[in-house]
Image (spheres, rainbow, N blue to C red):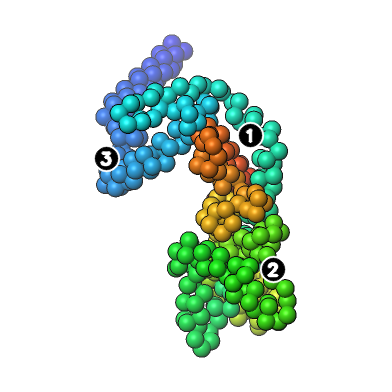
Amino acid sequence: MAAHTSQSVAKAAGDDVENDVAARGRSRRTDSRNPGGLRRALATHWYAWAMITPVVLVLGVIIGWPLVRGIYLSLTDANERNVSRTIGVRHIEATYEFVGLDNYVDVISDPVFLQRLVWTVVWTVACVSITFTLGLVLANMLNRDFKGRAAYRMALILPWAVPGFVSVFAWRFLFNRDNGILNKILDGGGIAAIPWLDDPTWAKFSVIAVNVWLGVPFMMVALLGGLQSIPGELYEAAEMDGASPWQRFRHITLPGLRAVSMTVILLSTIWTFNMFPVIFLLTRGGPGDSTEILVTQAFREAFITSPRDFAVSATWGVLILLLLMIFALVYRRSLRKQGEVW
């Protein structure tokens, strides 16, 4: 009886081993017949891949190559005297050399970098905060039903439709010390003319005002779309419960706009940090260098100073990119801590 039982146990164990081996064989055969994850994705979504491939290639050429080239130049001592150039029929080869991180050490240790960085941060925070506040106020006003609402919307969006350089030149005429409309109005009221673009403090105020003028329409449209996505039943229920307008704004409007606000604040921060046209066209960084930001300083190194220093300009550009990447990562982490997905 014991021998019979042990034979049964051994047979059962043998059957289990054979079944396991057979299962592994079938699994290998199945895996060999199934394509890999990438091949399967290509086979399933080949049309989508075909559509985005040209975009990826164009972005690689327009953004990828200049970025790689800029990083490489920032590690050299390239300037207009030692880069390759052609004079008539004579071609002169490049003689610049690899210097490693020397340019980064020189730029960061230069007091000019800290000055430009501080003013760039102040300029960005001031522009984004004022633009967001005004955009939110205007969006709340235009979200209500009143006569002529469409006309007001078109009028407020108009600054966004006008090309930026046209708006900046118009404001330059308005800020003119001798013939500008603003000083004419002040003169009519017995107030002395203000040196809008000739005094460092007033010049900073002026560039912030113009950038806010250009940025409010985008902020208003984005926030207006967010307001219209908030269910009206929430406001009706809160009003029936006796909530004040401020309480409805605080507990319904602001939470309902959180997703939109996070996006527009991030985009506005990046755009303002790199807002070259307003500074350059309105003040050219002046008076002196009081309104120079990081991006205009990079432009000055590459196209204005003599000799033009391409390596230092590229170094400023890479540092700007690193600062924005650090900001985006910190911003994303803070949002994730608040439970927001971005």
Using the image as rendered, state which of residue 195 and residue 37 is in the foreground: 195
Mark 3 Cα-neighbour bin, 10 Å: few <14, some 14–19, many ≥20: few
Residue 166 vs residue 219, the one in the foreground = 166
Residue at 61% over, 25% down: 102
The Cα atoms of the two marked residues, 3 and 2, are separated by 67 Å
Residue 304, percent across and down?
53, 43
Residue placed most toward the observer, 96 or 264: 96
Residue 70, image x, y percentages = 48, 34
Q: Mark 3 highlights which residue? A: 43
Distance (Cα) linking label 2 and label 1: 35 Å
Q: Quadrant of the N terminus?
A: top left
Q: Secondary structure at mark 2?
A: loop
- Lower sequence index among marks 2 and 1: 1
Where does label 1 land, which residue? 107
Q: Foreground mark, 1 or 3?
A: 1
First in sequence: mark 3 vs mark 2 = 3
Give residue 253's position: percent from left, percent from top: 62, 70
Amino acid residing under circle 2: Ile
Q: Amino acid at mark 1?
A: Val
In the image, what residue occupies the spot 49% across and 77% down? Answer: 155
Q: Is residue 291 left or right of residue 342?
A: right
Kind of residue sitting beneath label 3: Ala
Residue 141 seen: yes
Callout 1: few (<14), some (14-19), or many (20+) C-alpha neighbours within 10 Å?
some
Q: On screen, 275 above or below 135? A: above
Pick whichever, 141 or 290, lies toward us.
290
Point out residue 227 in the picture as x, y percentages from the top left corner. 55, 71
Residue at mark 2: 194
* Residue at x 51%, y 36% (from the top left corner): 308
**Rendered residue at 48%/23% (across/down):** 96
Q: Does residue 19 appear anywhere in the picture?
A: no
